[in-house]
Amino acid sequence: MVSKKSAAGLAAAVGAAVLLGAGSAQAATGSGETPLGTAALTKTDVGQALGGTTTGLGYGLAPIKSLRLDPWANSSADFLNNGAAVQPDQGLPAIGTGTLTGPLSAGGGVKDLPLVGGLTGLLPG
């Protein structure tokens, strides 16, 4: 069993060691020297930091761009496989929903959509 006097003495010894260590570190910095055990931060290379961020972002976004949006694609339960078409007058070609839903019902992702697919090329990955 440790007595109260020896515990108090141990605490005083630890406190004195901490104070003496801090005093020597202050004395070393006051003389212009860098004390041992201190760290100095270096300048950040912005080009490398931006390159690493872009690379990591590319690896994170690449699967999302090709993720299959229609879980029932190429199955009999696919509701996007049904389309509607309208034949306007004056000999104009038919307009239908298959142009927009076709890439999704074939199992495509965001990059396969007619309007949005071109914009995904701007994203890294």
Image: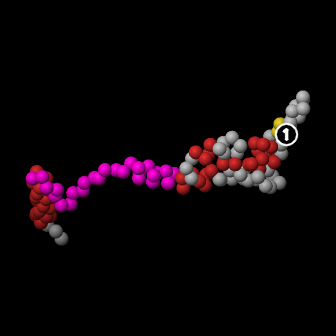
Quarter location, residue 91: top right
Q: Is residue 60 visible?
A: no
Vertically, is 107 above or below 82? below
Q: Amino acid at mark 1?
A: Ala
In terms of depth relative to the viewer, which is nearer, 13 or 122?
A: 122
Q: Position of residue 22 (x, y in %)?
A: 14, 55
Helix, strand or loop status at disc 1: loop
User: In the image, 83: left or right of 4?
Assistant: right
Q: Residue at x 81, y 52 (%)?
A: 77
User: In the image, 95: left or right of 25?
Assistant: right
Location of the N terminus by quadrant is bottom left
Q: Which residue is denoted by mark 1 in the rendering? A: 84
Q: Position of residue 70 (x, y in %)?
A: 72, 50
User: In the image, 98: left or right of 125?
Assistant: right
User: Which region of the structure is painted magenta?
Assistant: 31-57
Vertically, is 95 above or below 6? above
In terms of depth relative to the viewer, which is nearer, 4 or 93?
A: 93
User: Does 64 lie within the magenta span?
Assistant: no
